[in-house]
């Protein structure tokens, strides 16, 4: 391979230090001018520091169905020619075949004799194959094996390698006759699709067939993964690896996915790569960065140590009109903070043809580099996210109880809890934390021993989880009795709820957290009686306080009558600290400054006498990402508001020094200083829309030093 003027990793000459990796997903369709288009692409990559091209194969507008015969020959020749031009220019090259089972029918009917996917209601796909189909498996192994001979670094497995989300099927596939035959063998009797669907979704405790169906799906998928890895290994002489594109963990949980087994099956020579989906395809409000932060963190916990990670930066349908550069940049920073080893850039139109006709994209890639490279230079393998722990198990869908009897009800994860916490400036982690939060039906996935262990620590529950734990005999450890969960239209002897009203205990808790560890102006007890809205809650848990419980808020009816506790704190017989919310969808509560102070006070209560988590306030929608590497704590905070924000830190101890760097969108990193406001460290500069502030310090028991990066040793 010949090196171009820069370094072989796609970095221009003269640039030193660690660099963020750009892997550009791009389609070079067949044609007489392919070599010219490939050369133009190589030049664009050289100018913009792109280290690898991931060639799309028959994607989007070029998708004609599963490639066969002359059509496959045409794409094979194109991929071979493109790879030669790109590698000669010094680029690494990978391949992204567009379909495995098939994304969606999209009017295609060219399924070449494959057994079709069938939905829960019996609808058959026109162009999507069953994972159990032998003919499809033979095609898939031959297809990947043939292209593996060309010498690609990674051959990607598209995110259609799943059972859910196969339009126009309702929910997805996996209910075809071949799957029912496999399930019948496990059950020990002949089963039918309607009976299976009814059993799997039956309200109440899970029917045994649910776990068996998931075993059937899991086994079929693992068989295909093993066959695919074998085909690529044999045809590339072990040089290529596979990459798995994946969707949200909750949906894969419905499928019964075993992440460790699947990554093991796809591994070649102990190597495999994941592309976690984490961000939307088009413009959204900046506060949705909370979802992106959590999505990457949730999937980190599912990857074995040998799995590389390349999050996808997606812009669909791939024009500057779909997603702003500012949003794209902010999501690239999010991925880099989460430890991305490369960024899989999907930012050009799939029908673009000529890569040198997109100067705005070139500018985006160049202007994004300073912040990304700065973060790459601070990446450490030992960094562990810190925050409120959000416990979840990949097998959750096998245990949750349904209410309506619908398949989509099985998709349950901590994403709503993460949104609630992150949106109020509370960092989260998928690993153990000094405090844990268990919301909704996620509680169904844990046995009594695991729940008791959580209750012996610091645990935050919403109304649904509190009701679930009460039903399982843990009510005495909660401090409140969750007598029931009532929807907005449900009849109740005490009348419908209206508002959540602050009590004296709640006001005092807010005062304590506002001045934690420093001399600060304290919020006045005149806040007592302040009202917070619960009007948009779909339901509330009716919480009756027990002796020893500290009630921070109460739910009141429109005419002022008490309905039940709104939020409570309790130290239980196990020595654990438990906080309970009556809200059943806390992420949907109307946000407010008192709401944030209440949550921060709850986190500090749950931490007990060893508070350690950094908390963020000062403006709406400040979204934190916290990690520890040795004794160094790094807190990155994004502004999820369209308005410039003030960033204030709630630190339980006095750090040795706080080093602050401002990452404004598409700009060079800039050192900035901290100052003291009401006794709290506060960022001196305003944080712009979608900008990030990166704060670093080492805990110490002495007076805080507020400094710019240049003055900290």
Image (cartoon, rainbow, N blue to C red):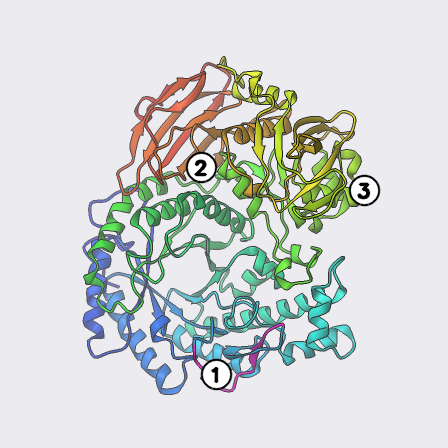
Q: Residue at x 64, y 23 (%)?
A: 503
Q: CA distance from mark 3 to mark 1?
A: 53 Å
Q: Quadrant of the N terminus?
A: bottom left
- Mark 3 lies on a secondary structure that is loop
> Which callout, 3 or 1, points at the residue further toward the start of the chain?
1
> Neighbour class for label 1 at 10 Å: few (<14), some, many (≥20)?
some
Q: Where in the figure is residue 137, as x and y percent of width and height? A: 53, 79
Magenta segment main secondary structure: loop
Q: Where in the figure is residue 317, as x and y percent of width and height? A: 34, 63
Residue 111 colored magenta?
yes
Apparent side of residue 134 relative to residue 405 in the rendered image (left or right): left
Q: Where in the figure is residue 124, as x and y percent of width and height? A: 56, 79
**Hey, which quadrant is residue 556 in on the image?**
top right
> Which callout, 3 or 2, points at the residue further toward the start of the chain?
3
> Which callout, 2 or 1, points at the residue further toward the start of the chain?
1
- Mark 2 lies on a secondary structure that is loop
Q: Nearer the viewer, mark 3 or mark 2?
A: 2
Q: Which residue is mark 1?
A: 111
Q: Residue at x 50, y 71 (%)?
A: 167
Q: Where in the figure is residue 139, as x and y percent of width and height? A: 48, 81
Residue placed most toward the observer, 47 or 289: 289
- Considering only vertical position in the picture, is 603 above or below 248? above
Where does the magenta region start and end?
107-120
Q: Residue at x 23, y 44 (%)?
A: 15
Q: Which mark is residue 473?
A: 3
Q: Residue at x 35, y 48 (%)?
A: 327
Residue placed most toward the observer, 104 or 48: 104
Q: Quadrant of the C terminus?
A: top left
- Considering only vertical position in the picture, is 167 above or below 467? below
Q: Which residue is mark 2?
A: 621
> Neighbour class for label 3 at 10 Å: few (<14), some, many (≥20)?
few
- Considering only vertical position in the picture, is 556 above or below 411? above
């Amino acid at each position: 391979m010949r090196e171009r003027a820069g370094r072989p990793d796609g970095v221009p000459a003269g640039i030193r230090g660690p660099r963020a990796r750009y892997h550009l997903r791009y389609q070079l369709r067949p044609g007489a001018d392919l070599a010219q288009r490939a050369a133009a692409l190589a030049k664009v990559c050289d100018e913009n520091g792109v280290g690898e091209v991931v060639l799309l194969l028959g994607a989007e507008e070029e998708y004609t169905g599963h490639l066969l015969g002359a059509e496959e020959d045409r794409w094979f020749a194109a991929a071979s020619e493109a790879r030669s031009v790109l590698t000669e220019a010094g680029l690494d090259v990978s391949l992204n075949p567009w379909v495995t089972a098939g994304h969606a029918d999209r009017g295609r009917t060219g399924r070449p004799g494959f057994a079709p996917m069938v939905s829960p209601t019996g609808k058959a796909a026109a162009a999507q194959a069953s994972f159990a189909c032998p003919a499809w498996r033979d095609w898939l192994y031959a297809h990947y094996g043939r292209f593996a001979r060309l010498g690609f670094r990674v051959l990607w497995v598209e995110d259609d390698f799943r059972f859910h989300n196969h339009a126009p099927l309702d929910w997805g596939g996996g209910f075809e006759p071949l799957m029912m035959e496999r399930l019948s063998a496990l059950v020990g009797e002949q089963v039918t699709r309607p009976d299976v669907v009814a059993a799997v979704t039956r309200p109440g405790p899970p029917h045994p067939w649910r776990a068996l169906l998931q075993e059937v799906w899991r086994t079929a998928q693992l068989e295909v993964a093993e066959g695919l890895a074998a085909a690529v290994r044999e045809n590339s002489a072990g040089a290529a690896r596979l990459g798995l594109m994946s969707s949200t963990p909750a949906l894969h949980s419905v499928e019964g996915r075993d992440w460790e087994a699947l990554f093991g099956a796809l591994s070649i020579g102990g190597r495999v790569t994941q592309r976690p989906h984490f961000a939307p395809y088009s413009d959204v409000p900046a506060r949705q960065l909370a979802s992106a932060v959590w999505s990457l963190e949730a999937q980190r916990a599912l990857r074995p140590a040998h799995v590389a990670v390349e999050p996808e930066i997606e812009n669909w349908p791939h024009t500057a009109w779909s997603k702003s550069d500012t949003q794209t940049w902010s999501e690239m920073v999010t991925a880099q903070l989460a430890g991305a080893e490369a960024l899989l850039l999907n930012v050009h139109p799939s029908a673009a043809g000529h890569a040198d006709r997109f100067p705005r994209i070139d500018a985006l890639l160049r202007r994004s580099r300073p912040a990304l490279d700065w973060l790459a230079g601070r990446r450490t393998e030992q960094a562990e996210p810190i925050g409120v722990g959000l416990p979840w198990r990949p097998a959750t869908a096998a245990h949750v109880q349904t209410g309506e009897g619908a398949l989509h009800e099985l998709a349950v994860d901590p994403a709503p809890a993460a949104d609630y916490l992150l949106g109020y400036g509370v960092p989260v982690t998928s690993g153990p934390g000094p405090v844990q939060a268990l919301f909704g039906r996620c509680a169904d996935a844990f046995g009594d021993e695991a729940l008791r262990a959580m209750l012996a620590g610091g645990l935050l529950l919403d109304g649904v989880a509190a009701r679930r734990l009460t039903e399982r005999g843990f009510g005495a450890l909660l401090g409140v009795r969750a007598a029931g969960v009532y929807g907005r239209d449900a009849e109740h002897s005490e009348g419908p709820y209206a508002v959540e009203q602050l009590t004296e205990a709640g006001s005092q808790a807010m005062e304590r957290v506002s001045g934690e560890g420093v001399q600060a102006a304290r919020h006045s007890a005149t806040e007592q009686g302040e009202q917070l809205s619960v009007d948009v809650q779909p339901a509330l848990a009716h919480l009756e306080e027990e002796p020893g419980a500290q009630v921070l808020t109460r739910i009141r009816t429109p005419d002022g009558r008490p309905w039940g506790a709104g939020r409570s704190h309790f130290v239980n017989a196990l020595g654990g600290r438990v906080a309970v919310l009556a809200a059943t969808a806390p992420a949907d509560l109307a946000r407010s400054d008192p709401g944030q102070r209440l949550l921060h006070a709850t986190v500090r209560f749950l931490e007990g006498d060893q508070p350690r988590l950094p908390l963020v306030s000062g403006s709406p929608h400040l979204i934190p990402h916290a990690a520890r590497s040795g004794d160094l704590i790094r807190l990155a905070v994004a502004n999820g508001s369209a308005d410039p924000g003030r960033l204030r830190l709630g630190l339980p101890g006095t750090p040795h020094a706080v080093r602050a760097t401002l990452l404004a969108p598409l700009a060079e990193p800039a050192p900035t200083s901290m100052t003291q406001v009401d006794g709290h460290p506060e960022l001196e500069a305003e944080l712009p829309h979608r900008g990030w502030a990166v704060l670093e310090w080492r805990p110490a028991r002495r007076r805080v030093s507020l400094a710019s990066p240049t003055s900290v040793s």
